[in-house]
Amino acid sequence: MSWITLKTTNARWEAELMQQVLAAHDIPSRILDTGITPYFGAGSSAALQVRPQDQWTALLLLSCPEEEQAGASDNN
């Protein structure tokens, strides 16, 4: 099974929260730790990955409503 990186974050808890949102909609995802930051106790950067066929649905679920409204007002 292939995976694509949907989002990256400097806080693993944020990736875990996004993963829970996707799980609530039955979208499989996984979190990969990136870098060596977690080994120094300074937090953990992470990448959230989904299957290619779930990419656009996941992006819509994780997008901010403000982004959608800003895009709509730019077109007026």
Image (cartoon, grey):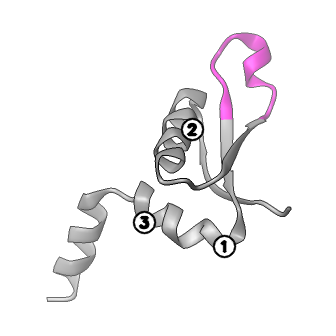
Whole-percent x, y for residue 1 in the image: 86, 62
Residue lying at 66% horizontally and 49% vertically, measured from the top left:
29
Q: Amino acid at mark 2?
A: Ala
Q: Secondary structure at mark 2?
A: helix
| Category of crowding for the residue at label 3, using alpha-carbon neighbours closer than 10 angstroms: few (below 14), some (14–19), many (at least 20) | few
Q: Residue furthest bottom?
A: 76
Q: Is residue 26 left or right of residue 76?
A: right
Which residue position holds label 1?
53
Residue lying at 65% horizontally and 52% vertically, measured from the top left:
28
On screen, residue 32 above or below 3: above
| Category of crowding for the residue at label 2, using alpha-carbon neighbours closer than 10 angstroms: few (below 14), some (14–19), many (at least 20) | many
| Category of crowding for the residue at label 1, using alpha-carbon neighbours closer than 10 angstroms: few (below 14), some (14–19), many (at least 20) | few
Q: Residue furthest front?
A: 26
Question: Quick one: label 3 or label 2, which is nearer the N terminus?
Answer: 2
Whole-percent x, y for residue 44 in the image: 66, 25
Residue lying at 54% horizontally and 27% vertically, measured from the top left:
13
Give, as a single range, the part of the protein colored magenta. 34-45
Name the residue nearer the viewer: 67 or 22: 22
Name the residue nearer the viewer: 59 or 41: 59
Which residue position holds label 2?
15
Q: Are marks 3 and 2 in contact (CB under 8 Å)?
A: no
Q: Is residue 24 magenta?
A: no
Which residue position holds label 3?
60
Q: Label 3 vs label 1: CA separation?
A: 13 Å
